[in-house]
Image: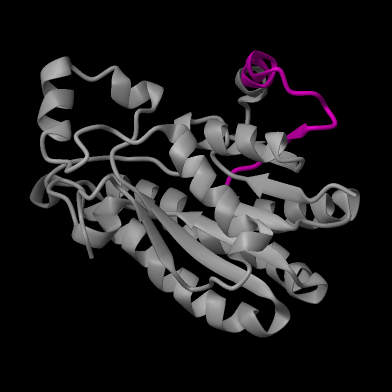
Protein backbone atom coordinates (compact mmCIF):
# COMPACT_ATOMS: atom_id res chain seq x y z
CA UNK A 1 0.00 0.00 0.00
CA UNK A 2 1.28 3.46 -0.88
CA UNK A 3 1.67 5.94 1.93
CA UNK A 4 -0.68 8.91 1.59
CA UNK A 5 0.60 12.47 1.97
CA UNK A 6 -1.68 15.50 2.28
CA UNK A 7 -0.06 18.75 1.12
CA UNK A 8 -1.66 22.15 1.54
CA UNK A 9 -0.59 24.98 -0.75
CA UNK A 10 0.46 22.28 -3.18
CA UNK A 11 0.31 24.38 -6.33
CA UNK A 12 2.87 27.03 -5.35
CA UNK A 13 6.56 26.90 -6.16
CA UNK A 14 7.58 25.03 -3.01
CA UNK A 15 4.34 23.06 -2.86
CA UNK A 16 4.77 21.83 -6.42
CA UNK A 17 8.32 20.70 -5.70
CA UNK A 18 7.17 18.82 -2.58
CA UNK A 19 4.31 17.19 -4.48
CA UNK A 20 6.61 16.08 -7.30
CA UNK A 21 9.24 14.76 -4.90
CA UNK A 22 6.81 12.66 -2.87
CA UNK A 23 5.15 11.30 -6.01
CA UNK A 24 8.60 10.34 -7.30
CA UNK A 25 9.30 8.57 -4.00
CA UNK A 26 6.12 6.50 -4.32
CA UNK A 27 3.65 8.41 -2.16
CA UNK A 28 0.05 9.04 -3.11
CA UNK A 29 -0.40 12.80 -2.76
CA UNK A 30 -3.61 14.57 -1.80
CA UNK A 31 -3.08 18.09 -3.12
CA UNK A 32 -5.37 20.76 -1.74
CA UNK A 33 -6.62 23.71 -3.75
CA UNK A 34 -8.65 26.73 -2.69
CA UNK A 35 -12.42 26.69 -2.98
CA UNK A 36 -13.59 27.43 -6.52
CA UNK A 37 -10.15 27.02 -8.10
CA UNK A 38 -10.72 23.61 -9.64
CA UNK A 39 -9.83 24.70 -13.19
CA UNK A 40 -6.54 26.18 -12.00
CA UNK A 41 -5.77 23.04 -10.00
CA UNK A 42 -6.56 20.77 -12.94
CA UNK A 43 -4.29 22.83 -15.19
CA UNK A 44 -1.46 22.41 -12.66
CA UNK A 45 -2.18 18.67 -12.42
CA UNK A 46 -1.95 18.28 -16.19
CA UNK A 47 1.18 20.43 -16.50
CA UNK A 48 2.95 18.23 -13.93
CA UNK A 49 1.92 15.07 -15.77
CA UNK A 50 0.36 13.43 -12.73
CA UNK A 51 -2.01 10.48 -12.88
CA UNK A 52 -5.15 10.04 -10.77
CA UNK A 53 -3.41 7.25 -8.88
CA UNK A 54 -0.48 9.52 -8.03
CA UNK A 55 -2.31 12.71 -7.08
CA UNK A 56 -5.81 13.45 -5.85
CA UNK A 57 -6.95 17.07 -6.14
CA UNK A 58 -8.84 18.07 -3.02
CA UNK A 59 -10.84 21.28 -2.58
CA UNK A 60 -10.24 22.82 0.86
CA UNK A 61 -10.35 26.27 2.44
CA UNK A 62 -7.69 25.93 5.13
CA UNK A 63 -9.04 29.03 6.92
CA UNK A 64 -12.50 27.49 7.42
CA UNK A 65 -12.54 25.38 10.59
CA UNK A 66 -15.84 23.57 10.10
CA UNK A 67 -15.23 22.83 6.42
CA UNK A 68 -11.82 21.35 7.24
CA UNK A 69 -13.29 19.18 9.99
CA UNK A 70 -16.01 17.82 7.72
CA UNK A 71 -14.01 17.36 4.54
CA UNK A 72 -10.93 15.89 6.20
CA UNK A 73 -13.05 13.41 8.14
CA UNK A 74 -14.55 12.33 4.82
CA UNK A 75 -11.09 12.17 3.25
CA UNK A 76 -9.86 9.85 6.00
CA UNK A 77 -12.75 7.48 5.34
CA UNK A 78 -12.12 7.48 1.58
CA UNK A 79 -8.32 7.16 1.66
CA UNK A 80 -8.13 4.98 4.75
CA UNK A 81 -5.13 6.85 6.15
CA UNK A 82 -3.07 10.00 6.07
CA UNK A 83 0.52 9.03 6.79
CA UNK A 84 2.13 12.40 6.07
CA UNK A 85 0.83 15.94 6.48
CA UNK A 86 2.71 18.92 5.04
CA UNK A 87 1.23 22.25 6.12
CA UNK A 88 2.58 24.50 3.38
CA UNK A 89 -0.27 26.92 2.63
CA UNK A 90 0.73 30.53 3.11
CA UNK A 91 0.21 34.09 1.93
CA UNK A 92 1.81 37.50 2.48
CA UNK A 93 0.16 40.88 3.02
CA UNK A 94 3.21 43.03 3.67
CA UNK A 95 3.23 46.53 5.10
CA UNK A 96 4.73 48.51 7.95
CA UNK A 97 2.87 47.74 11.15
CA UNK A 98 1.70 51.28 11.90
CA UNK A 99 -0.16 51.25 8.57
CA UNK A 100 -1.17 47.58 8.57
CA UNK A 101 -4.90 46.96 8.33
CA UNK A 102 -6.73 44.50 10.55
CA UNK A 103 -7.74 42.62 7.40
CA UNK A 104 -4.10 42.21 6.34
CA UNK A 105 -3.21 40.93 9.80
CA UNK A 106 -6.14 38.52 10.00
CA UNK A 107 -5.73 37.12 6.47
CA UNK A 108 -2.11 36.13 7.11
CA UNK A 109 -2.75 34.73 10.61
CA UNK A 110 -5.76 32.75 9.36
CA UNK A 111 -3.98 31.27 6.33
CA UNK A 112 -0.51 30.70 7.77
CA UNK A 113 -1.19 29.89 11.43
CA UNK A 114 -4.84 29.13 12.20
CA UNK A 115 -4.79 26.71 9.26
CA UNK A 116 -2.47 24.49 11.32
CA UNK A 117 -5.29 23.85 13.77
CA UNK A 118 -7.93 23.58 11.06
CA UNK A 119 -6.03 20.98 9.00
CA UNK A 120 -4.06 19.09 11.63
CA UNK A 121 -6.66 18.66 14.37
CA UNK A 122 -9.10 16.53 12.30
CA UNK A 123 -6.25 14.18 11.30
CA UNK A 124 -4.10 13.99 14.42
CA UNK A 125 -6.03 11.36 16.37
CA UNK A 126 -6.05 8.96 13.43
CA UNK A 127 -2.32 9.54 12.86
CA UNK A 128 -1.61 8.79 16.52
CA UNK A 129 -3.77 5.68 16.42
CA UNK A 130 -1.90 4.37 13.40
CA UNK A 131 1.59 5.49 14.50
CA UNK A 132 4.69 6.04 12.38
CA UNK A 133 3.21 9.20 10.84
CA UNK A 134 4.87 12.50 9.99
CA UNK A 135 3.86 16.15 10.14
CA UNK A 136 6.04 18.83 8.56
CA UNK A 137 5.16 22.51 8.82
CA UNK A 138 6.72 24.98 6.41
CA UNK A 139 7.76 28.11 8.28
CA UNK A 140 10.27 30.73 7.10
CA UNK A 141 13.60 32.32 7.95
CA UNK A 142 11.52 35.38 8.79
CA UNK A 143 9.74 33.43 11.51
CA UNK A 144 13.15 33.02 13.14
CA UNK A 145 14.69 36.44 12.67
CA UNK A 146 11.71 38.72 11.92
CA UNK A 147 11.47 40.98 8.89
CA UNK A 148 10.68 44.66 8.42
CA UNK A 149 7.17 45.07 7.01
CA UNK A 150 6.15 41.52 7.88
CA UNK A 151 4.88 41.66 11.45
CA UNK A 152 1.89 39.52 10.47
CA UNK A 153 3.89 36.98 8.45
CA UNK A 154 6.76 36.73 10.97
CA UNK A 155 4.29 36.28 13.83
CA UNK A 156 2.48 33.49 12.00
CA UNK A 157 5.66 31.70 10.97
CA UNK A 158 7.13 31.95 14.47
CA UNK A 159 3.85 30.63 15.87
CA UNK A 160 4.19 27.57 13.64
CA UNK A 161 7.41 26.69 15.43
CA UNK A 162 5.86 26.86 18.91
CA UNK A 163 2.86 24.86 17.71
CA UNK A 164 5.14 22.18 16.25
CA UNK A 165 7.21 21.78 19.43
CA UNK A 166 4.07 21.37 21.54
CA UNK A 167 2.47 18.92 19.13
CA UNK A 168 5.73 16.95 18.86
CA UNK A 169 5.58 16.38 22.62
CA UNK A 170 2.01 15.09 22.32
CA UNK A 171 2.65 12.88 19.31
CA UNK A 172 5.92 11.30 20.39
CA UNK A 173 4.43 8.49 22.47
CA UNK A 174 2.37 7.44 19.45
CA UNK A 175 5.25 7.56 16.98
CA UNK A 176 4.04 10.74 15.26
CA UNK A 177 6.88 13.17 14.57
CA UNK A 178 6.29 16.89 14.07
CA UNK A 179 8.98 19.10 12.58
CA UNK A 180 9.45 22.46 10.89
CA UNK A 181 11.34 23.50 7.80
CA UNK A 182 12.27 27.19 7.65
CA UNK A 183 13.26 28.06 4.07
CA UNK A 184 15.16 31.19 3.19
CA UNK A 185 14.68 33.04 -0.08
CA UNK A 186 13.68 30.43 -2.65
CA UNK A 187 13.67 30.62 -6.45
CA UNK A 188 9.96 30.13 -6.94
CA UNK A 189 8.33 31.51 -10.12
CA UNK A 190 6.97 34.43 -8.10
CA UNK A 191 10.37 35.37 -6.67
CA UNK A 192 12.11 34.99 -10.03
CA UNK A 193 9.79 37.65 -11.48
CA UNK A 194 11.36 40.28 -9.23
CA UNK A 195 13.67 42.86 -10.79
CA UNK A 196 17.21 41.64 -11.22
CA UNK A 197 18.67 44.39 -9.05
CA UNK A 198 16.34 43.34 -6.23
CA UNK A 199 17.37 39.70 -6.62
CA UNK A 200 21.03 40.75 -6.65
CA UNK A 201 20.58 42.71 -3.42
CA UNK A 202 18.98 39.67 -1.80
CA UNK A 203 21.61 37.15 -2.88
CA UNK A 204 24.40 39.51 -1.78
CA UNK A 205 23.25 39.00 1.83
CA UNK A 206 23.24 35.18 1.58
CA UNK A 207 26.58 33.52 2.39
CA UNK A 208 26.07 30.89 -0.32
CA UNK A 209 25.30 33.74 -2.79
CA UNK A 210 22.24 32.17 -4.36
CA UNK A 211 18.58 31.46 -3.76
CA UNK A 212 17.40 28.03 -2.65
CA UNK A 213 15.96 25.75 -5.30
CA UNK A 214 12.40 24.61 -4.53
CA UNK A 215 13.67 21.06 -4.97
CA UNK A 216 16.08 21.57 -2.07
CA UNK A 217 13.18 22.39 0.22
CA UNK A 218 11.34 19.33 -1.10
CA UNK A 219 14.38 17.14 -0.43
CA UNK A 220 14.40 18.34 3.18
CA UNK A 221 10.71 17.49 3.52
CA UNK A 222 11.29 14.02 2.11
CA UNK A 223 14.16 13.42 4.54
CA UNK A 224 11.97 14.29 7.53
CA UNK A 225 9.03 12.13 6.40
CA UNK A 226 11.20 9.16 5.42
CA UNK A 227 12.48 6.41 7.71
CA UNK A 228 15.77 8.35 7.89
CA UNK A 229 13.98 11.09 9.86
CA UNK A 230 12.15 8.78 12.26
CA UNK A 231 14.17 9.88 15.32
CA UNK A 232 13.81 13.61 14.70
CA UNK A 233 10.90 15.48 16.25
CA UNK A 234 10.22 18.98 17.55
CA UNK A 235 13.03 20.41 15.44
CA UNK A 236 13.32 23.32 13.02
CA UNK A 237 15.50 22.66 9.97
CA UNK A 238 16.75 25.88 8.40
CA UNK A 239 17.37 25.75 4.64
CA UNK A 240 18.55 29.28 4.02
CA UNK A 241 22.09 29.22 2.63
CA UNK A 242 23.49 30.62 5.88
CA UNK A 243 21.36 33.77 5.76
CA UNK A 244 20.41 33.36 9.42
CA UNK A 245 22.31 31.06 11.76
CA UNK A 246 20.25 30.58 14.89
Q: Position of residue 68 (x, y in %)?
A: 66, 53
Question: Which residue is depicted at the point 68% across and 55% down?
Answer: 84
Q: How far from the left and from the top, in percent, is residue 2?
A: 84, 47
Residue 228 image position (x, y, % from top left): 62, 61
Q: In which quarter of the image is the C terminus?
A: bottom left
Identify the residue shown where x is 46% and y is 75%: 165
- Which residue does the image show at 79% across and 32% down from the upper left? 54
Q: In this view, does 9 lie above or below 142?
A: above
Q: Where is residue 240 in the image (x, y as percent from the top left)?
A: 29, 47
**Residue 87 visible in image:** no
The magenta-colored residue range is 42-63
Residue situated in front as seen by the camera: 211 or 64: 211
Instruction: Report the front residue among 75 and 227.
Output: 227
Based on the displayed image, in which of its 4 quarters is residue 237 positioned?
Answer: bottom left
Left or right, 236 with respect to 121, comes to left
Is 129 above or below relative to 143? below
As for residue 59 lying within the magenta part, the answer is yes
- Residue 125 seen: yes
Q: How many marks?
A: 0
- Residue closest to the eye, 56 or 63: 56
Q: Is residue 145 magenta?
A: no
Name the foreground residue: 19 vs 240.
240
Question: On the rendered structure, is 179 left or right of 95?
Answer: right
Amino acid sequence: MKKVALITGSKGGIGSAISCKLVKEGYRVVATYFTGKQDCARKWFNEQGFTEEQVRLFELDVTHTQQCAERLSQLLQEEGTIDVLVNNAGITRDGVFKKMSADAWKAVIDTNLNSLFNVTQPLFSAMCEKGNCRIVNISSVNGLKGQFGQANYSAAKAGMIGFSKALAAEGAKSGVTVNVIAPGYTATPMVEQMKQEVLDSITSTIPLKRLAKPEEIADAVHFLVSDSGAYITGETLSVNGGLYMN
